[in-house]
Every structure is written in structure tokens, then in C-alpha cells.
Image (cartoon, rainbow, N blue to C red):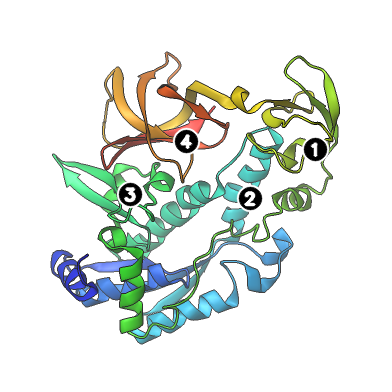
Amino acid sequence: MTSPSSRTARIVTTVKPEKILIAMSGGVDSSVAALLLSEAGCECVGATMRLFHNEDAGVSREKSCCSLEDVEDARSVAYQLGMPFYVFNFTDGFGEQVMDRFVDAYERGATPNPCIDCNRYMKFAKLVERAELLGCDAVATGHYARIEQENGRWLLKKAVDDSKDQSYVLYFLNQRQLAHLRFPLGTLHKTEAREIAEKHGLVNARKRDSQDICFVPDGDYARVIELRTGQKAKPGPFVDREGHVLGEHAGIIHYTIGQRKGLGLGIEHPYYVCEKRPEDNTVVLGPNEALFTTELDAGDFNWIAYETPPAELHVKAKIRYRQQEQPATVTQNPDGTVHVSFDEPQRAIARGQAVVLYDGDTVVGGGTIL
């Protein structure tokens, strides 16, 4: 593995000096991104986004990405690097574009990915606008992904560190955004980023990564939904695939496709959540093999690699963040949605999640599973 010092030197020499707005969460990744761009001679401006009031999600101030500690860590790094620093209040937009979408999806029986919505509707959309107001040329974040230009088109590519690659949650980026985004960590491994932070004495060099949805830090998303709506989830029947009632569920928002634990059924054979039917408040259970299928349709599709995609594509695709990409054939439906047919059956394809297409390291495009 290339040493941190030589890797940093290569980044510094390949980034052109420009004025950049750095999205700083208070974590080590965005702090190292700011450090690398500062060393590259860029005029950097730090910014932390205040996304929600903790009481809106019923969590303590100390447990979210918007905590005072995170803001102060970001401010400390910006001060150390000699950067101006701002805190932007985007709480109104976050409630509408992320939390309400999250609630609506669960109530419709889908399984949302709020981190994608946050990136799409808040971090990149809002920060690119704010960067223009501040006279910045680009926005930088600590995401592990790469942006390259080939034949006049901007492409999103996987990070060098496959274990940290975040291209899956960035599939929605358009050409204008890609042209004005910088991902300095795309060629680094996570261990190298921490070593760089340690070497430069950054206050958050050993800070642990956040693993939870920021507004659901304890994992109890059903409680957040009930708090947001002001209504308790309505119980209904568990049924098997033939329609036989197996018991009572606590409300469809409490379950995800593929779930086995927490069903509360004293049944000898294992059952899994196979379908959620909000129209009659029913949760359908079945054996594990019932979760496998080769087909899905996706809407709200964003093509990155093509202006006009071919009628049929042979790519690799994945239906969840931590999944390895799987071979698939992609065609377009007459209504504009996209049909994905996997070579091998995939387990627990869930409505509301993203399907993202890859050609090697390049993100071809992605959309929301219908």
C-alpha cells in the first residue's frame, strides 16, 4: 500500500487550486478532505449543515450528527487549517425532504434509504447553491468515491477502498453536480485517512464513524415515525402466502422485507416478512425461499454514464449498500421505468431501496425499486 505521505503528495499535485466549500460533519473523513485540499493550495471554506432539531426525532442532543460536539470538532479543524467556517441551518428542508419522505415510504409499505435522500435533496443540492452564493468553484465532501471526465462526460466511479466505497448512495448525481464536486478521499484507504489525521494532529483523528441514521441513532425508527405523525401504528394480521391468518402484527412500519426476528409468533417453522400490504394493513410471511426473485422495476432513474442509454445493457447491479454487485440485464419499459433482470435470484428485494448499476468501477445509473 502506498504510504500516506506519498499518497497525499500525489493528491496535492493533481488538484488545481480553486475556491472550495467543504462540507464538514465533524468526522475524520471530511476533516481530512479539507486538509488535503488546503495543502493543494485551494482556498477552502468550511461548512456544517444543521439538519434537524433533536427533539423532532425524540433523541438527545448528544446522539446525532447535528450534536454540538460535532459542530465544535468541525469548527476546531477549520480553525486549525485557517479556514472560514459557517453553520448552515437547513432544518426546514430536512424535515420535508428527508424525514417526511422516510415516514411516507414506511407508511406505503416501502423501505426507504434516508441517507440517499439526505445526500440528494440536502447535502449536494443545497451546498452547490450555497457555494455559488459564496463565490466558490466547487463543493467537497469526505465521501469515498471518485469523479472523472471521459469524452466530455462526467463519470462517478467507485473508491479505491472497496470496503468504504460510497458510490451506491451517490447514484443520483447529475452532470452539473459532478462537474462541481470534489471527493479527495476517493483514492485513499480509510486507514490512510486516519493516519493523515493523526500525523497532522486533527482533533477527531480517532473519532468513531457514525453507523446509524442520524435522526434514528438508537435504531427505533418506528418510534420516530409515530412521533413525526402523532399517530400510533395500527395492528393488523400476519398472513401466509395462501391468506391464512398466523397472528397479529404491531403495525406495518415495524417490519422490513426479509425480517425474521421480532415477529412474536410461536410457530415451529421459521417465517420471514415477504410483503407488506398497506391497502389492507397486512404483513405477508413465508419461507426463506419465497424471498428470492430475479426481476425488479425501478423508477426515478438517473443515468450518469449515458445521455441516452442503449435499449439493452449487460451490467452488474446491487440492491443494497453492502451487497456485492451481481450480473444483470437492463431494459427500459414503455412508461420510462427501468427493468432489471438478474442472472441469479436475489434475496429480499425491497420497494423503496435503490438499485445501482455498474460497469466495472463506473456507476452507470440508478433508481428507486418499485
Q: In the rendered image, which residue does mark 1 sit on? A: 251
**Which one is closest to the eye, mark 4 or mark 2?**
4
* Marked residue nearer the N-terminal end (4 or 2): 2
Q: Judge the density around disc 3: few (<14), some (14-19), many (≥20) Cα neighbours within 10 Å.
A: some
The residue that appears at 26% across and 38% down in the rendered structure is 360
Q: Is residue 331 above or below residue 219?
A: above
Cα distance between the residues tagged 4 and 2 = 22 Å
Q: CA distance from mark 1 to mark 2?
A: 19 Å
Q: Which mark is in front, 1 or 3?
A: 1
Which of 336 and 245 lies nearest the eye of the viewer? Answer: 245
Q: Which mark is residue 177?
A: 3
Label 4: which secondary element: loop
Q: Position of residue 284 (x, y in %)?
A: 73, 25
Give the number of callouts. 4
Q: Earlier in the sequence, mark 1 or mark 3?
A: 3
Along the viewing direction, whichever of 144 and 135 lies nearer the viewer: 144
Question: Hey, what amino acid is under mark 1?
Answer: Gly
Q: The residue tagged with tag 2: helix, strand or loop?
A: helix
Quadrant of the snapshot with the N terminus: bottom left
Q: Residue 159's x, y, as percent?
A: 30, 53
Mark 4 highlights which residue?
319
* Kind of residue at disc 3: Gln
Q: Would you call the spot at circle 1 few (<14 residues within 10 Å), some (14-19), or many (20 or more)?
A: some
Which numbered disc, 1 or 4, marks the residue that appears first in the sequence? 1
Seen in the image, is 180 located left or right of residue 54?
A: left
The residue that disc 2 covers is 99
Kind of residue at disc 2:
Met
Tell me if mark 2 has few (under 14), some (14-19) or many (20+) residues whose alpha carbon lies within 10 angstroms of its own: many
